[in-house]
Image (cartoon, helix red, strand yellow):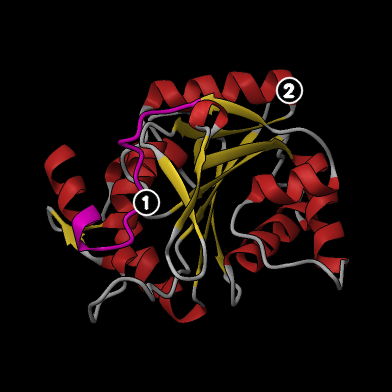
Amino acid sequence: MNNTTLVILIAGSSRRFAGKVKKQFIKVDNKPIFIHTLINMLKFNFNNVVLVSAEEEIKNIKKYIEKEEFIKEKIKKNIHYIKGGSERVYSVYNAMSFLNEHKEDIKTDYVFIHDGVRPLVKKKEIALLYETVLKYDAAILASKVVDTVKKVDENNNIIETIDRTYLYRAATPQGFKFDNYMSAIEKYINDKNADLVTDDAEIYSKYFGNVKISECSSDNIKITNREDLDIFIKLR
């Protein structure tokens, strides 16, 4: 039986979301969005959960978790709280390092990293992603690009129409064989010439190997603005 750990990132600063409350803590049906995300993800049977957040928010996050019987029943005591970093990649690294340091107690064969503001991923999509990761060691959820894509110059003049046949919109969760991704992210962190990255697949593909696509619905949105929030409210 493979041991799986779900890492949920809720340390975002919500720079693109106008409002006094960070998007992950906005309440819908009296629950913050990150709770909706966690409840949704726990429909799949993960062995462990790591929540990564700003240090000053951990206390409140624990209070929200304590109110949710479904979460406590599903994951029991196997939930851990980690301080995030200044950027997404450093939050992921903190979680990976924690799991690596405690691998005797928190056994992790495969790790699945998910945005705390993606509450609409379907259970069947997670299950298919899991099977793909088992087969290929690394895979991400992504949806096909269906719109016509234009490339522009610095003056917003169209200079090229991009062939969308092989284009996908990367989403999360992104899943990896734990030891492989631990190796990859350590190489990234130690690479002084590395550019800032925005997802884990980029790190894995650059420093370890190929990453497969496991297709998901375009409904698997990341809530980054008010329009996204309205979509979630309608689709939940």
Q: Is residue 217 magenta?
A: yes
Asked if one can make out residue 104 in the rendered structure from this viewpoint, the answer is no
Q: Is residue 4 magenta?
A: no
Q: Residue at x 84, y 42 (%)?
A: 208
Q: Is residue 155 left or right of residue 35?
A: right
Circle 2: element type: helix
Residue 56: image location, x then y, percent: 45, 81
Q: Residue at x 36, y 36 (%)?
A: 147
Residue toward you, 18 or 177: 18
**Mark 1 highlights which residue?**
222
Residue span colored magenta: 215-228
Q: Earlier in the sequence, mark 2 or mark 1?
A: 2
Q: Residue at x 44, y 32 (%)?
A: 143
Q: Residue at x 81, y 60 (%)?
A: 188
Q: Main secondary structure of the magenta part?
A: loop
Residue 141: image location, x then y, percent: 51, 33
Crowding around mark 2 (Cα neighbors within 10 Å: few <14, some 14 to 19, many 20+) is few
Crowding around mark 1 (Cα neighbors within 10 Å: few <14, some 14 to 19, many 20+) is some
Residue 99: image location, x then y, percent: 71, 53
Residue toward you, 5 or 164: 164
Residue 107: image location, x then y, percent: 72, 40
Choose top left, top right, bottom left or bottom right for residue 144.
Answer: top left
**Mark 2 highlights which residue?**
136
Q: Quadrant of the N terminus?
A: top right
Q: Is residue 155 left or right of residue 212?
A: left
Q: Which three-letter amino acid code belongs to the residue tagged 2? A: Tyr
Residue toward you, 101 or 219: 219
